[in-house]
Structure formats: C-alpha cells, structure tokens
Image (cartoon, rainbow, N blue to C red):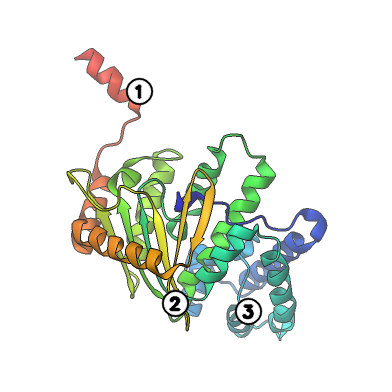
Amino acid sequence: MVGDFEDGELPTDSDGVAEFFSAVGKIIKFLRERAGMTQKEMAERLGYGEDLIGSIERGRRTPRVEFLNAADELLCAGGMLKAIAEDVMKAKVRVSTRHPAFSKAFTSEEAKAVEIHEYSIVAMPGLLQTEAHARALFRMRRPWLSTDQVNKWVAARMARQEILTRSSLPIMSWVIDEGVLRRPLGGWDVHREQLQRVIEVAEMWGTEIQVMPLDRSEHAGMGGSFVLLTPAGTTQVAYVEVQHVNRLITEPEDVRKMVARYSSIRAQALDPRESMALIQMMLGERKHDRADVVQEQLQH
C-alpha cells in the first residue's frame, strides 16, 4: 500500500543530525515567541501552513533555505537563520543517504516531480496524512515497531510533505477509495483531523482529490494502489507496493498501461466537488465504535 511504505529512517541519535534539527526548531520557536507571534501568525506572514511551523519547531521537518531566509527577516534574527542554512542543507543530504534503496529511489523521483498522481485503495496517501494519522498507522505494524522507529518514520513522512508548501506546486491528483476514508484509524479524533486535512489539501490550487465510492459495481483500480510520477525533464515512472514489497516501474509500456488505468479510475470516481461533499457528510455523521453499534443492535 503506497500510503504506508517506510519513507526511510532518519539518522540515529549518534549521528547528531536529529539533535541538530531539534536545536534549529527550538531556535525558531524562541525567535518567534520573542517576536510575539503565534505559529498561526507566523505561518500567515510567511505563506506556509501552521502545521509546518509546528513540525519544524519540534524538529519533525527540515526547513528549506527559502524558509530560513524569510523567517530570519520576519523574526529579526539578525542573520542567524541565514547563517545556518548551509548547515541545514548538508544535514538534509546526510538524511537522504540513510534511506533504504527502494525508498530513496521513490522519494528522489517524488521530490523533483512536476506531476504526482496516486490511486489508493488501502491506506491514506502519504502526502495527505496528518502526523497523528501517520503515527497511528505505524503503531499498527506487525511485527511491532519500537517507539524510536515510529518517531523516525513519522518524521520522514512529514518531511516528504514539504512538497505541499512550495510556492509552485506540482500538478497533483489523488483518487481514494471510500473505504479508506471511512476507516477511523487511530480513533475518531485522529480520523476527523485526517478528513479535514484531505479537504484542506483539496482546496489548494493545482490539486484534485476524488473518491471512488463503495457502490461502484466495478472499477479499474481493483489491482491495487499505485503512484504515477513525472520528474522534470524525464519520462513518467510508476511506483507500487504491497506487503512492504516495493517496485519503481520505469518500463515505458508498463507505465503507459498504468496511466491508462488511472484515467479510467478517475472517470469512474466521483468528481472533485461530489467527493468533497461526501467527505463533509462523513464529518457530520454521528460516530460510533463498532462495539457501540453491536450493543445497540442487541438492545433492539
């Protein structure tokens, strides 16, 4: 399932990189609070999302040079953040070299893509996941993952979402099976936040999100989840994963077939407006745990 692959391990504590990003985050937080700004106010002034500011301050995401330069001026840091920008970039390179081979191949193509299209029938697409949803997802792994491993994978997943903060977004679309949107992984509070995040991304210029409804008697996506990437200046590639077995597909004929399949999937799904209306309806529905529903049925 494409939405739940290992984005790659961040460096271990002995590398010192994790502590470095944490320290950078603390400096930014100190400067922001000294300037009398909330995370929301800072995000609005810089043109970023509030969640990104919070993740950077917690050391969960690595700031880009453009962010550090803009934050330096906004927070009157006197060149402090600009001075560490080069060190931040070097640290990010060290992180990327620690990704498993399969993950590095995919994330490398994703980071430079001018188009990203994904169909997901099992899990929420990684680029749309909230931090709480990603954490819940990794905690469900069997065999069990250590808390340290979960933290590293969550941080790596959040770092991938830097794509969504760019001033010029790639062309992006997602088709998500309705079953994925109805399964409250992590509990209703986590799930409600996740559905709201999907709506938030759908409202971004250049993105489209569609839902494949459960009442479709047939559709072209039953072969499983996949991602289509178009890196700048190169040919389109595809990525698939099942049971943590991953493959980056580059053979032109195989990719062509997947592109055609994705076109059929989009045509068979609800259109973007209908899809958002369905998700809004889900948010408004009364929620029960499965046990509560069973109990109610027994009582009647």
Cα gap from disc 3 to disc 2, whole angstroms:
33 Å
Which residue is label 2 attached to? 235
Q: Position of residue 35 (x, y in %)?
A: 61, 75
Q: Residues within 10 Å of mark 3 (few under 14, many from 20)?
A: many
Q: Residue at x 36, y 40 (%)?
A: 183
Cα gap from disc 1 to disc 3, whole angstroms:
49 Å
Determine if residue 214 is in view. yes
Q: In the rendered structure, which disc, 1 or 3, sits on the residue that comes first in sequence?
A: 3
Q: Amino acid under label 1?
A: Ala
Is the C terminus in the top left, top right, bottom left or bottom right quadrant?
A: top left
Which residue is label 3 attached to? 68
Q: Position of residue 135 (x, y in %)?
A: 54, 46
Q: Residue at x 29, y 18 (%)?
A: 295
Quadrant of the rendered structure where residue 13 is? bottom right
Q: Amino acid under label 3?
A: Leu
Q: In the rendered structure, which disc, 1 or 2, sits on the residue that comes first in sequence?
A: 2
Which residue is label 1 attached to? 291
Q: Residues within 10 Å of mark 2 (few under 14, many from 20)?
A: few
Q: Position of residue 98 (x, y in %)?
A: 70, 61
> For the view shown, which residue lies furthest in the top direction?
299
